[in-house]
C-alpha cells in the first residue's frame, strides 16, 4: 500500500503568534507528517461577509496574520524538510499563496464556488510535470449531486478548473463518530479524509477504508482552550500517535499478490499436501 499523505493542519491553534507557528512546524515534522498546513485571509471582515458569518468574525481574525509571515512560514517548512500548505478563502488571496505551495487546499465552505475553484487554475508546478497544481477539496456539507456537478464542470471545461482530488469530510467541530460514514472512502469518488474528530485512531480507520490523503488538526500544549480549533485538534503526543497508527495500518495492508511471506518460510516445509 502506498504511503498516505498526512497533512497536519495548524488551523488557528497558533493563537496568532509567529513563534507558535514555528513550533507547530517542528511538532508536525517530529510527528511524521508530510505537510504542515496553515490558514490565512487578507481580510477577516470580507471573509465573514462572504460566508454570511458575522458571528465568527472573531475566529477569522485569528488567521489574519501579516502577509509577509507566509514567506517566513514557507522558509521554516523548507528548513524543517516538510511541505508547506496554506488554505485561503478569498479569490484575491489565491495568487498570493500560489507561488508558495505545491498544491492547493479548498475548504468545504468554498467547495461549491466554481469561480473560486477557477481562481486556482493556471498555476504551473514543476514537480507535477506540465500539469497545473492540484486542488484538494473538502466535501463537508456537500451532496453526491453537488460533487458530480463539480466533476462535470471539470470535464466540460478542463482548462477552467484545476485538477481536483476530493476529501470526504464531516464539517462539524468536532465531528460525531456516528456521522463519519467512512464507507464513502471505498469508492473512487474520494482520495482521502479531512478529520475533525479529535481522536488518534480515526486516521487509521480511514486508511483501512481506502484514504490516500489525511488532513488532521493539531494544536500546541499552550494553545488557548478558547481557540476556535482547540476542541477538535490533537495535542502533540496525540498527533504522533495518530500518524504512527496510520503507518502501522499501511504496513498491515502491505501490497502485492498472495504468496509465502518471509515469516512463513520456516514453516512451509511442514505443509501437508494431497
Image (tube, grey):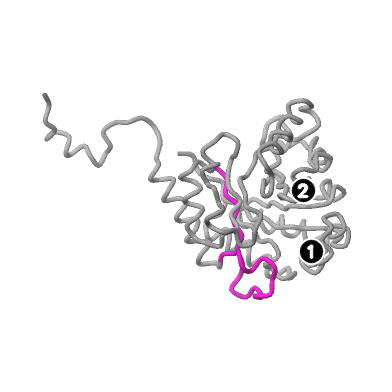
Is residue 24 positioned above or below 151 on the image? Answer: below
Q: Which residue is mark 1?
A: 60
**Residue in the image at 81% along x and 31% along y:** 160
Is residue 226 positioned above or below 262 on the image? Answer: below
Residue 65 shown left or right of residue 102 in the figure: right
**Residue in the image at 61% along x and 68% along y:** 231
- Residue 151 at what x, y percent from top left? 70, 32
Residue 229 shown left or right of residue 268 in the figure: right
Q: Nearer the viewer, residue 14 or 227?
A: 227
- State the quadrant of the C terminus: top left
Q: Is residue 252 magenta?
A: no
Q: Which residues are magenta?
A: 212-234
Which quadrant of the view contains residue 20? Answer: bottom right
Is residue 233 positioned above or below 157 on the image? Answer: below
Q: Nearer the viewer, residue 149 or 212?
A: 149
* Dominant secondary structure (helix, strand or loop) of the stretch shown in magenta: loop
Tally of numbered discs:
2
Is residue 7 positioned above or below 115 on the image? Answer: below
Q: Nearer the viewer, residue 46 or 143?
A: 143
**Residue in the image at 68% along x and 75% along y:** 226
- Residue 115 at what x, y percent from top left? 84, 40
How far apart are the alpha carbons under marks 2 and 1? Answer: 15 Å
- Residue 237 at what x, y percent from top left? 50, 67
Q: Which residue is mark 2?
A: 110
Residue 222 shown left or right of residue 247 in the figure: right
Amino acid at each position: 500500500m502506498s504511503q498516505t499523505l498526512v497533512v497536519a493542519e495548524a488551523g488557528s491553534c497558533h493563537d496568532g503568534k509567529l513563534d507558535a507557528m514555528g513550533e507547530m512546524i517542528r511538532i508536525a515534522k517530529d510527528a511524521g507528517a508530510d505537510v504542515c498546513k496553515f490558514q490565512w485571509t487578507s481580510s477577516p471582515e470580507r471573509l465573514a461577509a462572504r460566508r454570511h458569518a458575522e458571528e465568527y468574525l472573531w475566529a477569522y481574525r485569528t488567521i489574519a496574520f501579516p502577509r509577509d509571515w507566509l514567506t517566513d512560514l514557507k522558509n521554516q517548512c523548507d528548513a524543517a524538510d516538510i511541505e508547506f500548505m496554506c488554505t485561503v478563502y478569498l479569490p484575491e488571496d489565491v495568487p498570493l499563496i500560489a507561488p508558495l505551495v505545491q498544491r492547493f487546499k479548498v475548504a468545504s465552505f468554498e467547495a461549491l464556488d466554481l469561480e473560486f475553484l477557477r481562481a486556482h487554475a493556471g498555476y504551473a508546478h514543476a514537480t507535477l510535470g506540465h500539469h497545473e497544481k492540484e486542488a484538494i477539496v473538502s466535501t463537508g456539507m456537500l451532496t453526491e449531486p453537488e460533487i458530480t456537478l463539480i466533476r462535470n464542470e471539470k470535464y466540460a471545461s478542463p482548462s477552467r478548473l484545476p485538477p481536483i482530488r476530493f476529501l470526504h469530510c464531516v464539517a462539524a467541530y468536532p465531528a460525531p463518530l456516528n456521522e463519519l460514514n467512512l464507507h464513502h472512502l471505498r469508492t473512487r469518488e474520494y482520495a482521502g479524509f479531512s478529520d475533525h474528530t479529535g481522536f488518534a485512531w480515526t486516521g487509521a480507520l480511514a486508511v483501512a477504508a481506502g484514504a490516500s490523503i489525511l488532513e488532521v488538526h493539531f494544536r500546541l500544549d499552550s494553545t488557548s482552550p478558547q481557540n476556535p480549533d482547540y476542541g477538535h485538534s490533537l495535542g502533540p503526543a496525540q498527533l504522533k500517535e495518530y500518524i504512527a497508527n496510520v503507518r502501522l495500518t499501511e504496513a498491515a495492508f502491505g501490497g502485492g499478490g498472495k504468496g509465502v511471506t518471509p515469516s512463513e518460510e520456516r514453516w512451509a516445509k511442514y505443509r501437508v499436501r494431497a
